[in-house]
Amino acid sequence: MHRSILITQCLQNDFVKPIGKYDPLPNLLHVGYEESRRLMGEDSANGAVARVMRWAYQQPDDELHLVHIRDWHSPDDISQASHLRQFGEHCVEDTPGASFVFPEPPNNPKRIDVVDSLTLNDFVGTRLETVLEPYRGTRTRVGIIGVWTEAKVTFLSYDLRTRFPDFEIAVCSALTASSSRAHHFQALDQLAKLLGVVVFSSVGEFVELLGGAHEQVPLPIPADITHPEITIEGAGELGGTDHHLIRYLFRDARSVKLRCLDGGFSGNLVLGSNSVDLYGHPQVPYVVKIGSQAPIGKERASFERVESVLGNNAPQITDFADYRDRGGIKYRYAAMGGGFSTTFQKRYCAGLSHEKIERYLKSVFIEQLGKFYQAAQVEKCNLMEYYCFNPQLALGVRKRVEELLGEPAGQPVLSFPSGRQFPNVCHFYEEDLARIMPTASGSAWFSYVHGDLNGANIIIDAQENVWLIDFFHTHRGHVLKDLAKLENDLLYIFTPVGDSAELDEALRLTDRLLGVEDLAAPLCSAGDTGLERPELLRAWRTIALLRSFYPSLLQHDRDPLQLLIAQMRYAMHTLSFDESNEWQKKWALYTGARCGAMIVERLARRGPLRLDWFDPRHTSPGRLGITILPGRRDGGRGIAADLATLRNQGVSHIVCLLSMPEFHRYGVDALLEEYRNAGMTVHHLPILDQSVSTAEEMRDLTGWIRARLAEGGTIAMHCVGGLGRSGMAAACWLKSLGLSPSEAIAEVRRIRTRRAIETTAQEAFVRSYEP
């Protein structure tokens, strides 16, 4: 019995034969220039598909069964007429277009089963089921390579899963393709999610699943070839496997000079190149990354998901390879000239001017990553889970904290020798985290993000072009992730702190940052912070620049809780950094501890519905309070529980300021009816989010509030977050009682939060409102 099966799907010239960038498609089913180049490689005779097929043909029949499924059409067959009308003429029997795109070794003794498929279903009218019948009921490993991922590969996987449920099915992202890169990766995600197909990023891992070994897929470098001559600066001697990968990736070069760049961690090499081709011509600069096979494969697949979005601001993968337990990627940059000069981190630490900091960061976050962020959408999530908070980390956190402080951390409040106190973050992980994590469910803006943006992953070339490297962690995630990560490194790696006095001033910077209530509001000027050290003033100005990107990313979601979670995650991770000194780690510890306490306090508000009540001197004999939208489904709330809280608080009247589309958007379509069924009187004034009402509508509302309070009513007022529209209406009501505009605004912000009355337009409305 064969141990594994490799099935090729439509690896034929009419589907995937490499074509020129501007050549017309040979038929309607060809995957096109970009995908055929990605699948077959720039050198198709030695690309990943060709190497895997050479390996497959060399395997004994009792270890690997090789099955080729091919489209095989006859224009004269009336039963195929509708298929050919829909997809056009392709893969006509015995024509070059129907031939396999990979080289078939002559006189090979291996048994090959070729299945001729006439439709989208490879089991209808074919011998495929007969070929696979001997494996029924066995845990056979089946690998599929070929095209189209969202069609023929998916349909075949579905049929295999339903007809042969015991099969272990796998595909490799590098060995499958479609006409659309987006459809390709969407299909891979669905294969894994719905059919349980194992999706590999690494060719080597895929081959290993089928029973191969790393060394069985050799790189095609003849033993008698000595080029290229390799020299390397800053990385010591290359290991034998890495040397072999470099030789393969630069097999068209006479010589290559490599320079070690920052940005590679966990045993990875990141190398800039200057190479000369076989004819003596200088080649364009490349970046080569080499590391363990699986992570390198994941980085390649992650980058391929977003390559088309970044365009010329992103590198292009010109080649990749797996060899033994290592993998390599060769990146080419569209406008890179003269090699690399340095990284953003090195330039910043060497005194980079603020003007250039601004230019470089705008290039990163607007011109490059901004293309990701523009497509952000609100998604349900638990940000504590997303940022990998886990109570099981408590032991490690305690160990690092006590090592840093040099004493046991047993008290609820810890302190530095200077006397500065801060909450014991060990207790956060040991006691609070498991309790509060469920309450962190809600929603946030998500888009594709770089995922690990540090100063060493931003490259500045000799012409001061800005490039990003290291896309291993690229994924769809929290839109602030990249900005929060870079801010963290800016503080606790880039900004020097060398003694207790410098630490104390650094803690004052943290205190100012943690006092921010509105993520869309600009930070104050550096001169207004009270900071004195130039390094801290410089850090403040740079953070102000980073945070200036927030408003367009967050829109109405300006709650600082999301940033506190990210800040704590990265600050606590800093305690394990080799790059940070003792004082920088103490600074990070202080930030993480304070963030933890603030997170606990803010998440506590997400328990039973909370109403913030105005002073009785303004409301007696009634009461007026502001709250968030009761029953908000995207925040994990339930209308029954929130109505019970309102009844227990004695609420008799409701002021609802939601616009009509918001009832459905937040899952509370029947909210007004629910209020009335609970015996509450409702005044509904629809106001668009971030906007204002008319003055006449507001006069009507404030008059209604005064009348109900005079009757002894208890009123709960809300919009969605209970800040902008509710704060504006409450301030106008206070003005109707005789308070000045400033007094009314201050009173609303005192009982609610400094974020209340969110927009400039709302505050201007309050100030100009005439009761």
Image (cartoon, rainbow, N blue to C red):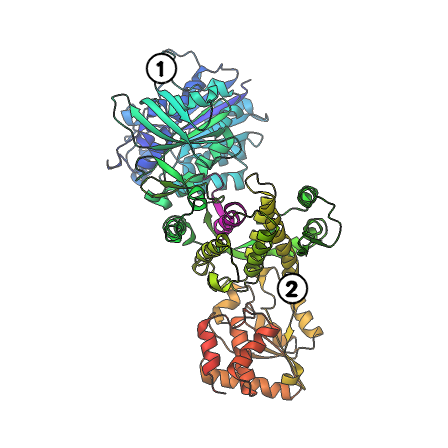
Nearest to the observer: residue 757 or residue 740: 740
Q: Residue 448: percent from the left, percent from the top?
A: 45, 48
**Tag 2's secondary structure?**
loop
- Please name the amino acid that badge 2 sits on: Arg
Q: Residue 310: percent from the left, percent from the top?
A: 37, 45
User: Quick one: label 1, few (<14), some, or many (20+) residues within 10 Å?
Assistant: few
- Which residue is rendered at x = 41% and y = 35% of the image? 152
User: Quick one: label 2, few (<14), some, or many (20+) residues within 10 Å?
Assistant: few
Residue 152 shown left or right of residue 657 in the figure: left
**Tag 1's secondary structure?**
loop
Distance from disc 1 to disc 2, alpha carbons, whole Å, reads 69 Å
Q: Is residue 197 magenta?
A: no
> What residue is pinned by disc 1?
226
Q: Residue 295: percent from the left, percent from the top?
A: 50, 33
Q: Quadrant of the N terminus?
A: top right
User: Considering only vertical position in the picture, is 743 above or below 177?
Assistant: below
Nearest to the observer: residue 329 or residue 123: 329
How many labels, in total?
A: 2
Q: Which residues are magenta?
A: 471-495
> What residue is pinned by disc 2?
605
Residue 127 quadrant? top left
- Please name the amino acid that badge 1 sits on: Thr
